[in-house]
Image (tube, helix red, strand yellow):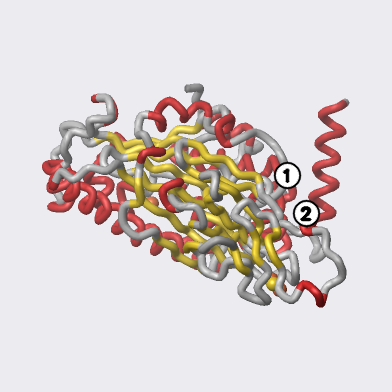
Amino acid sequence: MKFTTAEALYQKAGGKRNGLPAWCYKNSELTQLEIEEVFLKNWNWIAHVSDIPEAGDFQCLNIANERAVVIRDNDGQVRAFHNLCRHRGSRVVAEDKGHCNNAIVCPFHGWSYQFNGELKNISRPKEFPTLDKSKYGLKPLDCEVWHGLIFVRFSGFGPSVAQILTEADQEIGLYKIADMESCGQPWHFDFDLDWKTITDIDKEGYHVAMGHPELFDLTGSSYRDEVLECGLSRSQGSFKNRRAKTPLVQDYIATLPVSNHLPESHQHLWIYWGMFPGVVISLSPDTVEVYQIYPAGFQKSVMAGACYALPDQRPEMQKARALSSAINNNTGEEDIRLVKWAAQGMESSAFDEVLLSDLEIGICAFQNQLRELIPVMALDQAPERGSLKQVNQQLLLRRKTAEIA
Ligand code: FES
Ligand SMILES: [Fe+2]
């Protein structure tokens, strides 16, 4: 793995360590551009193959105004579509997760679609002019299954998930995620704040020592964040030979049995792989958790995820999973509080800018990626109202011209 250095990352940020300017966290035009350029054109995680095991099983993902549905077809293939009826635009599945019998039937007027997206029947066909059914199928989305994880992309083109995650492939492959099953309830938190406030906290482990007493008790100062040259991030903490102080962590370490599918090097590690913009694959010897952070609109964000594990009925493994889940839940609640405080801080009249350390390179790397796609985010002041998209376009053009020259 090729890692990058704090020096290189901050140099790319123009030598600045003050992060994104505060206006970037409260500008509706920027949020809209981020949705279009960052989220719709990149891969988002939607489900695990075990979430939709049977033909007709489906699961949804909504990012701002875009709605995706993945469904298992009759040949066992995973298909992804816009959750959008071709008649008048209703969602074709009403729930976020469920099962369709025989066909996808739109809840508005009853048009039905095959699981492969083809239009099957329309209600009261005689009331319509002759219709070429082949032109009215559900609109497909880019979809890729990688190690049992299903990803969708709403628009654009670029490298596949497998290409983006090449450097993570060997390590993540150890965990046999494709053979896993859902473990516990999926979770979903809505926030009334900018999505980057959550990502900023999620991208650095500097706060672990103060902000997460149990996670810190588990990994101590072994916790570290790394950024790869390819743009992925990787964090890890080890609890090998760790003498924990908190009862929860002591119990977890004492209970966790050997995970037979993992080499010795990974028996005592918690690892977090981050893929731009918001996906995190969190690996522990007992459970794998996948989660992501994304905008739901202006000042509206979501952090949601789910856990998966290999079938293992050993009581000690069941108990270890419950304990690691408790540590994760506590960590999550602590993060929610920190996220809210960070957002409130930016509203204060006394707030000017942040100062990033070498332990917060994950933030710098993530913001560099954002500035690469949306250069307007490098400006100290917000462009005049109504002009952000245009100013950004000019900056992109200027960069292209400079590259050619
Ligand atoms: S909107 Fe779907 S059937 Fe009318
Ligand atoms: Fe945290």
Q: Is residue 18 visible?
A: no
Q: Secondary structure at mark 1?
A: loop
Question: What residue sits 15% from the left and 51% below the top?
Answer: 246
Residue 166 horizontal/vertical position (percent): 53, 27
**Classed neighbour count for the residue bearing mark 1: other residues with Cα under 10 Å, few (<14), some (14–19), many (≥20):** few
Which residue of the protein is positioned furthest toward the front in this rendering? 126
- Please, what is the three-letter code of the amino acid marked with disc 2? Ser
Q: Quadrant of ligand 1?
A: bottom right
The quadrant in which residue 17 appears is top right
Q: Nearer the viewer, residue 40 or 72?
A: 72
Residue 122 horizontal/vertical position (percent): 72, 69
Q: Secondary structure at mark 2?
A: helix
- Asked whether the beta carbons under mark 2 and mark 1 sit within 8 Å of each other, the answer is no
On the image, numbered disc 2 is attached to which residue?
134
On the image, numbered disc 1 is attached to which residue?
156
Which residue of the protein is positioned furthest toward the top in this rendering? 2
- Please, what is the three-letter code of the amino acid marked with disc 1? Gly
Number of numbered discs on residues: 2
Q: Nearer the viewer, residue 107 or 260?
A: 107
Locate residue 146 relative to residue 83 in the image: left or right. left
Residue 66 horizontal/vertical position (percent): 66, 61
Question: What residue sits 65% from the left and 65% below the top?
Answer: 112
Locate residue 394 relative to residue 341 in the image: left or right. right
Residue 75 horizontal/vertical position (percent): 54, 44
Question: What residue sits 58% from the left and 30% below the top?
Answer: 163
